[in-house]
Image (cartoon, rainbow, N blue to C red):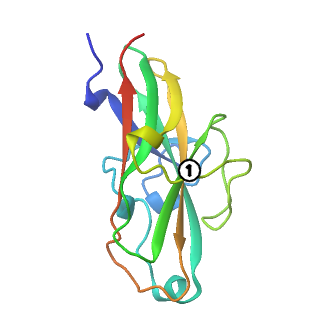
Amino acid sequence: MAIVAGDLKMYLTGGAANADPTLSLGGTTSSVQFTDNTLDKLFASVGPADALAGAIHYRALTFKNTSALTAYSATIHISQETTSADTTVAIAYDSTGTQSVVDEDTAPVGLSFSTPLSLATAIALGDVAAAGVARIWFKRTVTAAAAAATADTGKFTITVGSAP
């Protein structure tokens, strides 16, 4: 028996009932599933102030393996870069999974963000046991003098390997 894609889910953070992706700032995992792996659903549109001055914002999601099987060698990578030339997204694995930040402008402590753009350079999450979780942080950087963008899409992908 194999794990099916529907058993691999992402959830917002920021409180047990948080349903607002812009408040997904770590801490308690929400009961609200993040059903879209597109980055424009995780971050607000690039408004005039952020476009003019530039900005760095953070979000956290919890990856849950809802299968009865272990998700071996789980990884995450950015499978589609943001559509705006003025933004980039980087990701980091938070092995403790408990960190939270006070606002979207505050960086989580001790994490190393990177921009893995292929499965070959994906960030290893390790084996995620049945009913286990892994915390993923996202960092969006908007360059100063950027164009405002209402739908700055990009995608991330979680993959799992087969049993050893």
Between 5 and 17, the one lying in front of the other is: 5
**Whether residue 31 can be seen here:** no
Classify the position of the C terminus by image quarter. top left
The quadrant of the picture occupied by the N terminus is top left
Q: Residue 54: where, in percent of width, then height?
A: 57, 81
- Viewer-proximal residue, 31 or 163? 163
Residue toward you, 1 or 18: 1
* SS class, disc 1: loop
Foreground of the two, 15 or 118: 118
Which x, y percent locates residue 45? 40, 75
The x, y position of residue 116, in whole percent, is 47, 49
Q: Is residue 99 above or below residue 71?
A: below
Is 162 situated left or right of 49 in this image?
left
- Within-10-Å neighbours for mark 1: few <14, some 14–19, many 20+: many
In the image: residue 149, left or right of residue 48: left
**Total number of numbered discs in the rendering:** 1
In the image, residue 29 above or below residue 73: below
| Amino acid on which the number 1 mark rests in the picture | Gly
Residue 148's x, y, as percent? 40, 85
Residue at screen point 45% across, 83% down: 47
Q: Quick one: which residue is furthest to the right in this view?
A: 110
1 up-or-down from 13: above or below: above
Residue 81, quarter of picture: bottom left
Q: Which residue extends farthest front? A: 120
**Residue at horizontal 66 percent and vertical 39 percent from the top:** 98
Q: Is residue 150 visible?
A: yes
Circle 1 residue: 14
| Residue drawn at (59%, 87%) of the image | 53
Q: Is residue 70 left or right of residue 29?
A: left
Residue at 38% from the left image edge and 27% from the top image edge:
160
